[in-house]
Structure formats: structure tokens, C-alpha cells
Image: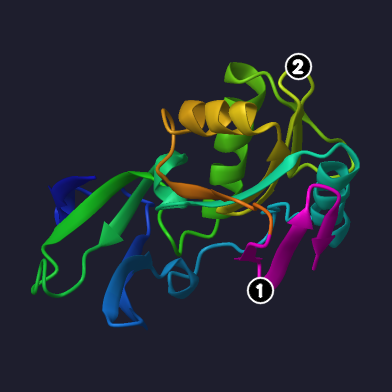
Amino acid sequence: KKDIPREKVPKGKKLIRSMWVEKMKGDECRSRLVAMEFAAGLAKDGVFAATPSATGVRVVVVISVAEELELMVCDFTFAFMHAPTEEKMYVIPPKDYSPDESIVWEVSQALNGFRRSPKWFQDWLAEILTRKMEFGQCRTDPQVFVAKKRRVILDIHVDDPLGAGVRKNLDTTLKELKHYVLIKEGKILTNGMTVKHLARLYTREDLSLIHI
């Protein structure tokens, strides 16, 4: 972002207010800056961001069982903020940053609350996976990516990837992805372990059996 005087905002550009959204997680209070584009009166048509189907998730799980592959879950941190915007956006900071609203942020990275942020992030991530990491993108479910050579398949729900593959190749894939996006350490679903992914619990008894 770049601080600019409010009067320097180009004509025709609407200002988008922002606010801090706080949420308690255990004993920890987390704050997130959210743009309020919904209140700026901007057009709402023509934006489509894909979401993976329930079938896509099950396909990854079935393939991991059928081919006795490891199953991995992880989380992208500050996902949207990695993606560039298609145009410069102008955001009014929260009151604690500019009480008189004389300063405006010129933003070129996606923020939570921008209407097109999910689409920008999906397009950016798909380009990383397909052009730089040699994954193929599924035509029927665009949030499923397959790398045949490394035997890794990914199903990505916004910022929550689910992957299946040989342990060594999953580790290599995570290491490569970390060059582009912040990732919380992935969890490999080992025998007897239960993990939560998209509000569902996955329990592995052995390489050939997973309970959902």
C-alpha cells in the first residue's frame, strides 16, 4: 500500500472504507483488516470465483486410499493479500490510522472485503501451480490440480488445500509453494490421526482406510 492525500485520488475512483474485525480464538484475539466494498456502491455483476465441489474433495480422498498415498491438510495465511489487483484500489484506513480521513491507501494487493479478491487469488494461484509447478488444472472442477510426474493431487477451497501424494513429494510441493504464499505447517494424516478440514473430521486407520 501507499499513503496518499485524499485529494490525490484519481477522478472517477470510489473510496472504500475499511475496519478492523476482531475474533477470539481460544485465549487469542485476532484482528483482520477488512475492506467494505459492499458499502461503496460498486457494481456487483460479472464476478465469478470457483469453489470446489464435494465430489472433488472425495476424489482426492478416494485416490489417496486407492493408491495408498498420504493425505495432507494445510492452510494459506493471509491468502488474498498475495494476489495482485487488476487495478489500483483506494481505501480509507480505519479511524485509528487517519482520524480525519485525510489519508487514503492506494492498494495494489487484494484485501478481504474486495468483491473480486477470491477471483484474483484463484487466478494468481492457478498460474503459480500450472506455469511454475507443472500442475494440470481439472476442467470439470477448476479447484482440483494434478501433477502426474510427482503423483500429487490438490483440492483447494479458497485458503484450505487438501492434498494426496507420496510423503516426499508432498513435502517438496509444500516447500515450493512456500516461495509464493505463506503456509501454516501441513498436517499429514497418519495412522490413528484425526484432522479437521472444512468442518469435517477425517480419521485414518491405515493407508487403505479413511473415515469421514
Stretch in magenta: 192-212
Q: Nearer the viewer, residue 210 or 62?
A: 210
Residue 123: x and y in percent read 61, 37
- Image quadrant holding the N terminus, namely top left
Residue 52: x and y in percent read 76, 54
Q: Which residue is mark 1?
A: 199
Q: Nearer the viewer, residue 172 or 11?
A: 172
Residues at circles 1 and 2 in contact by the CB criterion of under 8 Å: no
Number of marks drawn: 2
**In the depicted structure, whether residue 81 falls above or below residue 150:** below
- Image quadrant holding the C terminus, namely bottom right
Q: Which residue is mark 2?
A: 149
* Predominant SS of the magenta segment: strand
Rendered image: mark on residue 90: none
Query: Which amino acid is tagged 1?
Result: Ala
Q: CA distance from mark 1 to mark 2?
A: 31 Å
159 displayed left or right of 67: left
Indicate yes or no whether the magenta region holds residue 108: no
